[in-house]
Image: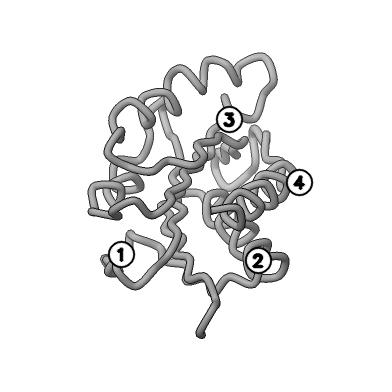
């Protein structure tokens, strides 16, 4: 593992979209940038020690216009000056006309509240709403996530 960048990706999902996105980010960072990636669903109660990693990606879903609190709890850790990226999945972030509202409501508060972190990226992606087991709304865009992960990988290489 010498020379490999160790990246922790934590996520909180309810409907599964945030996990899908976390897997895309993990795959991109592993395959294109050689990162050793650990994926952790924080609902399982695991709290990995930040000292073991070089970079962090934290993902959370949004439901009823609220970011899952547990999804962002990991940001309370002391990461020192290590780079941290955050992504959210929400239907608002997936629609061009409501994306600016998603930035204002969800992403800007993360930047404002976590000024102690070395935030290198905060982004929102589309979500999915299911009703009675059927997809009612789907604004997911895996290719946007992949492009973001590639940009993130480039940015992390430059650090």
On screen, residue 106 versus residue 69, left or right, reads: right
| x and y percentages locating residue 151 in the rendered image | 67, 46
Q: Secondary structure at mark 3?
A: helix
In the image, what residue occupies the spot 42% across and 41% down?
119
**In whole angstroms, how far apart are the C-alphas of marks 1 and 4?**
29 Å
Question: Dot 4: within a 10 Å radius of its alpha carbon, few (fewer than 14), some, or many (20 or more) residues?
Answer: few
In the displayed orientation, state which residue is furthest to the bottom.
1
| x and y percentages locating residue 100 in the rendered image | 57, 16
Q: Which residue is mark 4?
A: 143
Q: Which residue is mark 2?
A: 27
On screen, residue 14 versus residue 17, left or right, reads: left
In the displayed orientation, state which residue is furthest to the right.
143
Q: Secondary structure at mark 2?
A: helix
Q: Which residue is mark 3?
A: 91
**In whole angstroms, how far apart are the C-alphas of marks 1 and 3?**
30 Å
Q: Earlier in the sequence, mark 1 or mark 3?
A: 1
Q: Earlier in the sequence, mark 3 or mark 2?
A: 2
Question: Dot 3: within a 10 Å radius of its alpha carbon, few (fewer than 14), some, or many (20 or more) residues?
Answer: many
| x and y percentages locating residue 65 in the rendered image | 41, 25
Q: Secondary structure at mark 4?
A: helix
Marks 3 & 2, CB-CB < 8 Å contact: no
Of the pair 34 and 145, the residue shown nearer to us: 34
Q: Which residue is mark 1?
A: 50
């Amino acid at each position: 593992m010498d020379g490999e960048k160790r990246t922790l990706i934590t996520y909180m999902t309810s409907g599964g979209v945030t996990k899908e996105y976390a897997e895309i980010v993990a795959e991109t960072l592993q395959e294109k940038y050689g990162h050793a990636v650990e994926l952790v669903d924080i609902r399982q109660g695991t709290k990995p020690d930040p000292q073991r990693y070089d970079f962090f990606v934290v993902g959370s879903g949004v439901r009823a216009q609220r970011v899952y609190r547990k999804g962002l709890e990991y940001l309370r850790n002391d990461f020192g000056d290590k780079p941290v990226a955050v992504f959210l999945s929400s239907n608002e972030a997936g629609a061009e006309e409501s994306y600016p509202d998603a930035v204002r409501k969800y992403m800007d508060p993360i930047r404002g509240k976590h000024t102690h972190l070395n935030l290198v990226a905060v982004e929102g992606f589309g979500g999915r709403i299911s009703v009675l087991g059927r997809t009612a709304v789907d604004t997911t865009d895996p290719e946007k996530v992949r492009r973001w992960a590639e940009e993130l990988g480039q940015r992390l290489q430059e650090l």
